[in-house]
Amino acid sequence: MLNKQEILSLESLLQKGQVFTDVASLLSYELDAGVDRGMPDGVVLPHTAQDVARIVRWAGDHHVPLVGRGAGTGLSGGAVAEHGGLIVEFSRMNRVLDVDVYGRSAVVEPGLINLRLDEQVRAHGLYFPPDPASQRASTIGGNVSENSGGPHCFKYGVMTNYVTGMQVVLADGRVVQVGGRALDYPEYDFCGVLTGSEGMLALMTAINARLVRNPPGIQTMLAVFDSVEQAGIATSAVIAAGLIPATMEMMDQKIINIVEAWLHSGLLTEAAAMLIIEVDGYPESLDKQIEEVASILRSNGGHDLRVAASEEERNQIWLARKSAAGAIARLAPAHYTVDITVPRSRLTETLLEVNEICERYNLPVGHVFHAGDGNLHPLILIPDAQDEEYMQRVRDAGRETVEVAVRKDGSLSGEHGVGIEKRAFMSLMFNETELSAMLDIKHIFDPHNLFNPGKIFPSPSTGDGVRKSPETNVSAKPGKSEINYAPTTTEEAAQTLVACANAGQRVRRARGCAAYFSVASVINPSVP
Ligand SMILES: Cc1cc2nc3c(=O)[nH]c(=O)nc-3n(C[C@H](O)[C@H](O)[C@H](O)COP(=O)(O)OP(=O)(O)OC[C@H]3O[C@@H](n4cnc5c(N)ncnc54)[C@H](O)[C@@H]3O)c2cc1C
């Protein structure tokens, strides 16, 4: 926890309202969209790269860990301050700084929401293809840090294919530009190293994004299948034929029904599985492209093929696809999203094995994923995240699923990153030598382990120069030092939070509780 002196010295570097240390504010930074937790000691909201440089120097001097944060939609705990320290949240650095229409590039701040960039450049006839399903909320900084993908990455490639440069603040507070607007610079490929580095090497303060021409025509088609496995076979067949539609997304019946009950988008609820296939290019080419794909789908069990008749219908289909995770919240307060990638020829056998694992652990699972990339996302419903026995089954099933992917020459993470969630699995894919080579890079960029300590690498460590938080694992089960408490009004909850903050006590929010009932337990580290 930061002492009064430290808070004052940090505040003196910034303007009023840029630093928060009160428990009520910190609570909402305790987790991202995944299942791991950690309470930060403070949150800072920089306005400029110079603010970030001041924060980094201050943190270095005081040995306080720094955790970059975009929108907190990450699913692997990357933006969670599990060792305490400061969250550096980029929501106030959210501008498009420049769009070069002729050169087809943009310079943006890291806190810009992904969809805002795409909307702005479309007005110039341009297109920013990486479109994670979270694009209505997630930021470009978070997307670059996780090297995010999305439905259109099947044809267009993932984030790393659209980042040509970035301005970053290094661990000693230097502000440097790596890469730039051109596609190649005579330097090491720092930009490549930093993309996907999950906030562990530097903090990004601006990003050079590559744009492409807005496709002149698009057609979107739905195809129905009698089993998930059949849809997997059809996907592999399209790929084997060398066709590259813009998207190949799959939803199974469970997800179709959950989404349809909420959005009423006209999806066929009897369908065991559905593929969303989009083709783009010159308008004259679209019918031909669709027909080529359709004939492969039909000969592999696809039926009830339907092409969206209007832009509105197309938008409705994509809204349905990208709202799956939100719709699930109507059924269960939480879910665990598995993220694995396998070679696309092995999609069907993997789906079968994942279903078998979830059945064995008696876990309800739905599938919605980037089939064209071989990137599976089994969504396991969590009715009660406090049910430790259930959560252990979720973790065990998650691990077995990862093992399946690795055995099939796939990857333990397709796009959500390693963070806290998958670090224990890294040694399934990388040997000691490979891991230590990766760790060498971390040490060069960040010798005192200031940025996002403990993430990605299998043995969590708070690092040499970084102060250890007295209570590093706030996700621990309630111990005897924990007092359960349920306030009955908003005012009572607020007063309790203030009292706890003043007494230096930590507060842990119980999951699954609504509104003001969410403050359910008070942890008092001083109680023996
Ligand atoms: C419903 C839903 C759907 C999703 N769909 C997809 C999908 O289709 N594809 C996909 O790839 N992911 C998906 N995700 C995961 C998530 O949205 C992505 O990982 C996204 O890129 C995270 O962006 P964010 O702004 O929320 O970052 P955060 O979660 O805030 O942070 C993610 C990581 O980036 C680091 N970071 C953030 N900003 C900076 C910065 N300026 N400098 C240095 N490090 C920084 C953080 O430290 C952390 O390690 C989905 C998540 C949800 C909840």
Image (cartoon, grey):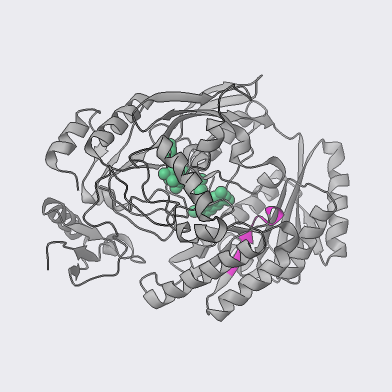
From the viewer's perspective, is residue 86 above or below residue 165? below
Q: Quadrant of the C terminus?
A: bottom left
Q: Nearer the viewer, residue 373 or 519?
A: 373
Q: Say which quarter of the image contains residue 228.
A: bottom right
Q: Nearer the viewer, residue 315 or 273?
A: 273
From the viewer's perspective, is residue 218 above or below residue 257? above
From the top left corner, tell me how far across and down residue 327 is, in percent: 53, 61
- The residue sitting at 83% across, 49% down in the picture is 242
Horizontal arrangement in the rendering, residue 90 relative to residue 355 (left or right): left
From the top left corner, tell me how far across and down residue 377 is, in percent: 59, 61
From the top left corner, tell me how far across and down residue 448 is, in percent: 33, 40
Q: Is residue 526 visible?
A: yes
- Residue sitting at the far front: 433
From the top left corner, tell me how far across and down residue 408 is, in percent: 67, 63
Q: Is residue 324 visible?
A: no
Q: Say which quarter of the image contains residue 482.
A: bottom left
User: What is the magenta range?
Assistant: 366-373
- The residue sitting at 54% across, 56% down in the picture is 431
* Residue 454 belongs to the span the image colors magenta: no
Q: Nearer the viewer, residue 133 or 122?
A: 133
From the viewer's perspective, is residue 346 above or below residue 115? below
Numbered circles on residues, count: 0
- The residue sitting at 40% across, 48% down in the picture is 79
- The residue sitting at 56% across, 35% down in the picture is 192
